[in-house]
Image (spheres, helix red, strand yellow):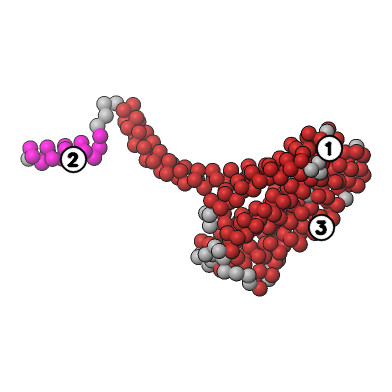
Amino acid sequence: MDEELAGQGLLEHRLIPRYDNSDDIEHGVKKRWCCNISDSTIVELKKQVCLAGPLVLVSLLQYSLQTIPVMFVGHLGQVCLSGASIATSFAGVTGFSLMLGMGSALETYCGQAYGAKEYHKLGVHMQRTMLVLMLMCFPISILWSYTGNILTFFRQDVEISIQSGIYAFWLIPAIFAYGLLQCQFGFLQTQNNIRPLVISTGITSLLHLVICWTLVCGFSFGSSGAAICSGIAYWFNVLILGMYIKFSPTWTGCSIEGVKNLSSFLALGIPSSLMLW
């Protein structure tokens, strides 16, 4: 009998820790809960940082491709700087933000295809998105061609409006490359393949600094040269990622399916674009 009581007491001691008062009980429960939460949180936090950290870096480097030319234009005078700043803002609202919003729909479709291991659909979705974005670039280009006239119509300073029109006109090649770049980003990002994005964007940003100094300061191309630099940088980045995707195991080549079901993409792309706009 004594042995059974001793065994029962030992069992209770091991399963249910004894505390002297309610404060000790509350402290023990919180300690066990915090340990469990901390372990799972740290593991999940590491995963998020490994994925989100490089993406944040890529976003900052991409943003620098538009800000670096404006910094170089600042050495040309206040009028040129004001014109480049207004043109950059105008282009961001009427062009770059639309490309970014429409391209975000690709992440949804590619994410579903990659999760279902239907890798052949990744390229199809990317081709469909490229087609839609390239078609969108033409009306945007026409709008940018009349940036100076639009600003003058809204009674902006004439000299600044002229400089803005010049800068926006030479920025037109960049919008086509930017649209393709968003498609490439979505294709790789949904596969958790972030390293090529970091490497290509880093190389492009360094090259962008050299080209901006060469055209703006070396050859004295002025604000138009700064805008041309943005186009060169974006197209260079597209070229690097294009070569990588060409030999990617999930790229199955061009398909006629890429020109079909455009309405289904627009049904998701237009709301996504309006959210960012």
Please state the extent of the stretch shown in magenta in the rendering.
2-17
Residue type, numbered disc 3: Pro
Q: Earlier in the sequence, mark 3 or mark 2?
A: 2
Residue type, numbered disc 2: Leu
Reply above or below: 73 against 140: above
Q: Name the residue under label 2.
A: 11
Mark number displayed over residue 139: 3
Regarding residue 89, the answer to whether it shows in the image is: no
Could you tell me which quadrant the N terminus lies in?
Answer: top left
Mark 2 vs mark 1, CA separation in Å: 82 Å
Estimate the x, y position of residue 59 in percent, counting from the top left. Answer: 62, 45
Viewer-closest of 193 and 122: 193
Residue type, numbered disc 1: Cys
Q: Mark 1 points at which residue?
A: 80
Q: Is mark 2 on a helix, strand or loop?
A: helix
Residue pictured at 60% horizontal, 51% vertical: 200
Regarding residue 165, the answer to whether it shows in the image is: yes
| Badge 3 density bin: few <14, some 14–19, many ≥20, Cα 10 Å | few
Residue pictured at 89% horizontal, 43% vertical: 162
Viewer-closest of 38 and 198: 198
As drawn, is 91 to the left or to the right of 234? right
Residue pictured at 53% horizontal, 51% vertical: 195
| Badge 1 density bin: few <14, some 14–19, many ≥20, Cα 10 Å | many
Estimate the x, y position of residue 145 in percent, counting from the top left. Answer: 86, 52
Viewer-closest of 227 and 9: 227
Q: Report which quarter residue 255 is drawn in.
A: bottom right
